[in-house]
Amino acid sequence: MLLKRYWQLVIGIFVSAFFIYLALPGLHLPDVVEALQTANYWWLLPGVGVYLIGLWARTWRWQYILRPVQLVPVKTLFPMVCIGYFGNNVFPFRAGELLRSYVLKRRTAIAISTSLATVIIERITDGLVMLLFVFLALPFAPMPDFFRNAVILMTVLFLAATIVFMWMASQPQRVEQAYALVAGSLLRGRVRQKSDDLYHRFMLGLRSLSHPSDVIMIFFTSVIIWLLETVKYWFVMHAFEFSVSFLVLMLMNGLVNLATTLPAAPGYIGTFDTPGIKTLAAFGVDPSVAASYTFTLHAALWVPVTLLGGYYFWREHLRLSDIEAARQQAESAPAPQVEAPRPGEATDSSATSSKALL
């Protein structure tokens, strides 16, 4: 296990170094430094304020996804979301997801494996919104045809996956029968046990997609989250001597955050910066100015939430050893059993709060 994580870290560092290498051609370091020195950094203040509002909206969305398990107040979840960002920004292997789930278990008794299952929904909706941003900008973006076709294909696949997941969430008994038939025919022993574990966790994560109204609400909050982040891009842009449309910033936001899903060094070094620089350069922004803006934007996104998350990390009396403890608890916990929702079941009531607790 340690060897596997070591190689994950090596691969992440290699990917970051490769992206940084891609950004270097066309950059003139003295021009980058000059743009950084002449920037009006007062524009970062409203940008950070908008970002914190978006962070609260992200917490609201997580609360909504957790509703089939237990209704947890947003003010209780907010520090955990900040701790999650702190962990992802500072530690390798996206340890923040484990840390926020670990703290949630201490506060609510919701099992780590159960809260980790909700990450599936966050990743699906985030990816769908990012592709939507890119898709909206396609008619105005100077992109190669193969890239346009790839974005269209990915958008269709994400939409199709969302529809399939919604059907799976609404028909758990049929999915259970199909899975049992296939797994019983093909899998045996420990492989079957691991497969069953992944299946039950996955189905638990889909619980919040069991009703169309829930899907609409989760998607709506995701759009709000990423629009607010694009507003921060817009505020920070005013600190530098260039201007592009809000649609271009939506495109940049989409491409940057799709790239950060790749394995990288902590803090998304390289995978955030290079797509941002290349996107702005494609719309006529000087690469050196684009680089100074992107570096500043990256810092403005990284520093506030990392400091805030670090404070909550300290207030929760967490240590580095808690990351490994959380990982062991997640791996050793029995697979959660997902009950089929009954017609008219009120997912946000206290009657449902104990169904998926371990």
Image (cartoon, helix red, strand yellow):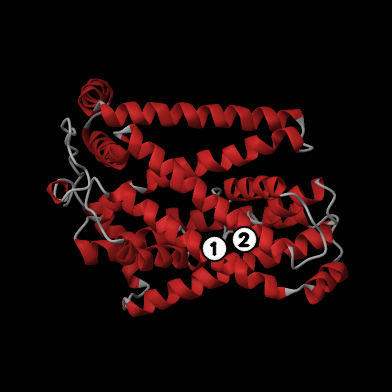
Q: Position of residue 168 (x, y in %)?
A: 31, 28
| Rendered image: mark on residue 288 | none
Q: Specify the quadrant that holds the N terminus.
A: bottom left
- Residue type, label 1: Tyr
181 to 305, vertically: above or below: above
Please tell me which residue lies in front, 48 or 35: 48
Three-letter amino acid code of the residue under disc 2: Lys
Nearer the N terminus, badge 1 or badge 2? 1
| Residue bearing the label numbered 2 | 232
Is residue 172 visible from the viewing direction of this image?
Answer: yes
In the rendered structure, the answer to whether residue 327 lies left or right of residue 296 reads: left
The answer to whether mark 1 and mark 2 are in CB contact below 8 A is yes
Q: Residues within 10 Å of mark 2 (few under 14, many from 20)?
A: many
Image disc number at residue 51: 1
Residue at the image point whose x is 66% and y is 64% from the top: 297
Give SS at disc 1.
helix
Q: Secondary structure at mark 2?
A: helix
Mark 1, Cα crowd under 10 Å, few <14 / some 14-19 / many 20+, is many
Front one among 342 and 24: 342
Nearer to me, 259 or 246: 246
Q: Position of residue 351 (x, y in %)?
A: 12, 47
Is residue 200 depicted above or below 294 in this figure? above
Q: CA distance from mark 1 to mark 2?
A: 6 Å
